[in-house]
Amino acid sequence: MEATNPTARALLCLELLQESPGTTAERLGERLGVSSRAARRYVGILREAGIPVESVRGPYGGYRVGRGLRLPPLTFSASEALGLVMAVLDGHHDAGDTTDPVGSALAKIIRALPEDVAAQAEAVRRATSPAPDRAAARPDPATAASLVRASSDHHRVRVTYQSESGREWTVQVDPWAVVVRHGRWYLLCLARPTEEDAGIRTYRVDRIRDVEVQAEVFEPPGGIDAVALLEEHLATGWEHRTEVVVDAPRDEVARSLPGGLGRLEALDDGTSRLVGSTSDPWWYAAQLVRLHAAYRVVGGPELQEAARTLGARLLAAGTVPGHDEGASRPGPDAT
């Protein structure tokens, strides 16, 4: 640890207790790089300063900060403050609007900073004009907070969900994780076997209309990679089935398409098959246009119709007025 004087170590001790309530003296000593006896001494320093550090005996006991503690003001270096402002602007484009919850919170933080640091941070906030991310979809903060809390506490939830098409349903799920991917928030969860929509599911948090935390608890699977599992299951459980055969090897197709369109399989003849589902066939058809090889939509009538209509529009866009389609045209060097 960088700090060597007792006061600094005591403050680090307070920070550790706030992060991990119930920490033992032995664990505190390990984190502080001192003996457990020294850790107890730092706890004593905190108590002498009037900070209510409580101790609980037993196998699940340890130290925790009691209620009623007023924390000292936050302090940021100039680089930390500017980094915070830049991160908020990058991820939330209403950060300059003080009527928006995030913009209001950022303004409060800036007002609490030292004058010279606050001036730099405010200059960045006011002078920067980030382009809106049209793909981003930010959920209601209360909804997101409820799901994160339920995931952390391992409580089942009942959510009411509305799809892109407007269909609405209610399902009870085990919330495994909340994942932020490319500006969108997703709930990775297990829909209960008693539900019609059972299995691993990924729900857009901004489309969740209601969250009801249940008393029942669940045991989450151990060692899961939430981001990888989200990618794998983004295209499962939606209204419209999709199946596409691509005249290219699997690895080549994977490089052309974004993740989350479904399960990509290598076929014996060197082609590939993409199998999944979607709530928005038009969006899905537009993603397939990125492919650099020929492809055929062999499953999902809604996707087939969207692909035909989109293909006709693309052909019409490439047609030169006054020329018959398919007629030969002079090259760029013809005279």
Image (cartoon, helix red, strand yellow):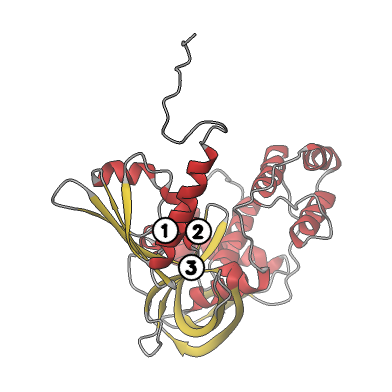
Q: Secondary structure at mark 1?
A: helix
The one of 313 and 68 positioned closer to us in this rendering: 313
**Residue for badge 3:** 279
As helix, strand or loop, the secondary structure at mark 3 comes to loop
Q: Amino acid at mark 2?
A: Trp
Left or right side of 236 for 83: right
Question: In the image, is 143 to the left or to the right of 1?
Answer: right
Crowdedness of circle 3 by 10 Å Cα count: few (<14), some, many (20+)?
Answer: some
> How many numbered marks does the figure carry?
3
Q: Residue at x 68, y 49 (%)?
A: 88
Residue at the spot of label 1: 227
Task: State the image coordinates of residue 240 (x, y, percent, origin top left).
Answer: 42, 70
Q: CA distance from mark 3 to mark 2?
A: 9 Å
Q: Nearer the viewer, residue 97 or 134?
A: 134
What whole-number distance in Å separates the C-alpha atoms at marks 3 and 1?
A: 21 Å
Residue that mark 2 sits on: 282
**Mark closer to the observer (2, 1):** 2
Q: Is residue 264 left or right of residue 161?
A: left
Q: Earlier in the sequence, mark 3 or mark 1?
A: 1
* Residue 33 is at least partly visible in this image: no
Q: Residue at x 80, y 47 (%)?
A: 113
Q: Where residue 26 sits: x, y (%)? A: 44, 65
Dot 2: what SS? helix
Mark 3 vs mark 2, foreground winner is 2
